[in-house]
Image (cartoon, helix red, strand yellow):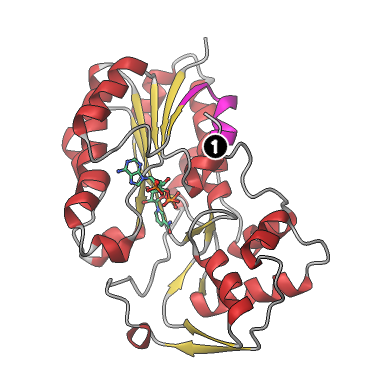
Amino acid sequence: MKPVILLTGKNGQVGAELLRLLPQVGEVVARGHDQLDLSNPADIRRTIREVRPQLIVNAAAYTAVDQAETDETTARAVNAEAPGLMAEEAKKIDAALVHYSTDYVFDGTKKAPYDEIDSVNSGLAHLIFRTAWVYATRGRNFLLTILRLATEREELKIVSDQVGAPTCASEVAGATAKILTRILERNDHSSVFSQVSGTYHMSAAGRTTWYEFAESILEKAEATSHIPEWLAAATKERPLIARRLIPISTKEFGSPTHRPVYSILSNSRLIQTFGVALPDWQAQLQRCFASDSIAANRGAD
Ligand SMILES: NC(=O)c1ccc[n+]([C@@H]2O[C@H](COP(=O)([O-])OP(=O)(O)OC[C@H]3O[C@@H](n4cnc5c(N)ncnc54)[C@H](OP(=O)(O)O)[C@@H]3O)[C@@H](O)[C@H]2O)c1
């Protein structure tokens, strides 16, 4: 029998891609923010008790990092307390938990999404995938922001002193689905899940800066002969008028959030344990420009 999977954050960048792929892994019960509010503990408990999943995949998160500085209570409730509560409930019904974490845990801020899972994780089958610089052909992200700005301004100032690996949400979801399939197809999947429980880095191979990423985005957008649907939506079918990219420092950009200057995550544990490697960031970007859909099954349950 296929396992029941509770997916949260189904309308997010990663969540929407998981909604497309997880039905290959199990019977998916998906919830969006409007159906399950992770800042409400009673809502979380009730949903898990009603659905009684074998697996919870938590793709919901408070990701507005700048806003999180001023709305720390909600950010903490969603990113730290909710996963902790999910872990507690999962343990009671012998369910496994998959959760995503961020490179921002390394920057000394208070948004450490996994620490509350850690406090209850003894005996809990869980996978925490830490990723970084996530973008998609939908949602709010750097790819779509650059494309919009390039239709509005001739000059764009882009931060050039942060190093990272832009990671496409569909690759994160694809790797997650592959790993879960491999575990769940085993007869002894409960013990396999316990053996592999832990935190894994899951980001694109290679490295770049926001400045070079912007350059690549605009090069690919100019070079594409077939305009994908998502690109037409991002630019509102207006021409790209940006002619000059100006590198600036993080300090000049002046964000209220302290962002790590170096965001490269070593994926070796993911590769060694599951044999799953995400492609290079340039190949991922190329795939986006080759894909037509904004995100399949948008809004589906
Ligand atoms: N984006 C990145 O650069 C990045 C980097 C590192 C790690 N990650 C991690 O990757 C995972 C997926 O992120 P993503 O990029 O897919 O983020 P996303 O596109 O912002 O999606 C997050 C989803 O969570 C929902 N959400 C927010 N507050 C909620 C609440 N109180 N209750 C229920 N749902 C709520 C959002 O709904 P609304 O939009 O309706 O609020 C949204 O659909 C997260 O764990 C994130 O921390 C992301």
Residue 272 lies left or right of residue 283; in this view the side is left
Is 261 positioned to the left or the right of 150 in the image?
left
Q: Is residue 175 left or right of residue 218?
A: left
In the image, residue 86 sits, relative to residue 16, either above or below, namely above
Image: 294 above or below 265: above
The residue identified by callout 1 is: 299
Q: Position of residue 2 (x, y in %)?
A: 52, 14
Residues in magenta, as a range: 19-29
The residue at the point 45 percent across, 18 percent down is 4
Number of residue marks: 1
Classify residue 252 by image quadrant: bottom left
Tell whether 22 sits left or right of 249.
right
Assess whether residue 122 is covered by the magenta stretch: no
Residue sticking out furthest to the right: 225
Label 1: how many Cα within 10 Å (few below 14, some 14–19, many 20+) = few
**Secondary structure state at the residue bearing disc 1:** loop
Position of residue 67 relative to residue 124, above or below, is below
Residue 241, image x, y percentages? 67, 83
Residue 26 falls inside the magenta stretch: yes
Q: Residue at x 57, y 41 (%)?
A: 174
Residue at 36% x, 75% y is 261
* Residue 122 visible in the displayed image: no
Note whether 79 is above or below 176 in the view shown.
below
**Residue at (26% x, 31% y) in the render:** 86
Foreground: 188 or 256? 256
Kind of residue indicated by mark 1:
Gly
Tell me if the residue at label 1 has its CB under 8 Å from ligand 1: no
Which x, y percent locates residue 263?
A: 39, 67
The image quadrant of residue 57 is top left
Residue 110 in view? yes
Q: Which residue ends up furthest to the top in the rendered image?
A: 1
Of 281 and 153, nearer the camera is 153
